[in-house]
Amino acid sequence: MIKFFRQIRQSMIKQNKTKKYLLYAIGEIILVVIGILIALQINNWNEDRKLASLEKAILIDLKQDLVITRNIMDDDLNQNKLKVEQLESMIFNIDNKIPYTKDMDTLFRALNAWASPYMVMTTYEIFKAKGVETIQNKEIKEKTITLYESTFPLLKDDYDRAEWALMESVTNPFVVKYFEYNTSSDKSVLTPNSYEELLENKEFRNLTTFVKHLRMVGLKTYSNTIDDIEELINLINSEIK
């Protein structure tokens, strides 16, 4: 093709057709420019396809992580609801001087047992490295960052850390002093050294009430987090369908 155009130029020059040659040269330049623009457009189109494919892959993987995290948190929420019910039963027993039964040992375990949150972070690490610029949907991008950088830390670093701090500094020392840790049954339980003494111990009731309050704060935080996860999953579903 280049040889063909060169032959035409040489022919025009030999025939002294300068004006036609100039027009031809301009046309040739325009054709070259158009060819370059088309090539660039094709290249941009290919890059856009690659980015769209990467974006969809990240969103699909992110959704899978969120579904797993939501399911884990649903289980945690149900476990912690049960712990709150057990703590409420303990407070009722204390206030009404209910006589001791072995079934109460399961209730006492709620003092220092709760479900700690776990979040699947794998895809979010990829999102931080590549997805921030790749994800085009602004709402998905913002809600993902808020969820992982604010909502999850609120649950894990605030609520769960408070549970651990209380257990290590207050609850466990109290449990070691007044209970026997029993693992002979299918699940671990706490057997009081003297139930009658516990009934008269104001510290025991205060501790039980405070643990219940903290656990209920956790339930609210869990519930809000699950709602935020569900909202983001729905947004991603709408984007990738």
Image: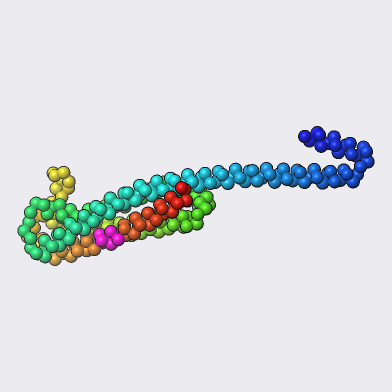
- Let me know if residue 7 appears in the view: yes
| Residue at the spot 46% in from the left edge and 55% down from the top edge | 140
Spot occupied by residue 202 in the image (x, y as percentages of width and height): 14, 66
Work out whether residue 125 or residue 77 is closer to the camera in this orientation and state it: 77
Farthest right residue? 16
- Most prominent secondary structure in the magenta stretch? helix
Q: Quadrant of the N terminus?
A: top right
| Residue 175 lies in the magenta stretch | no
Is residue 171 rendered to the left or right of residue 226? left
Quadrant of res 81: bottom left
Work out whether residue 96 or residue 163 is closer to the camera in this orientation and state it: 96
Quadrant of res 153: bottom left
Spot occupied by residue 189 in the image (x, y as percentages of width and height): 15, 50
Q: Magenta part of the protein: which range? A: 214-220
- Let me know if residue 111 appears in the view: no
| Residue at the spot 47% in from the left edge and 44% down from the top edge | 57
Is residue 121 rendered to the left or right of residue 106? right
| Residue at the spot 43% in from the left edge and 54% down from the top edge | 235
Quadrant of res 213: bottom left
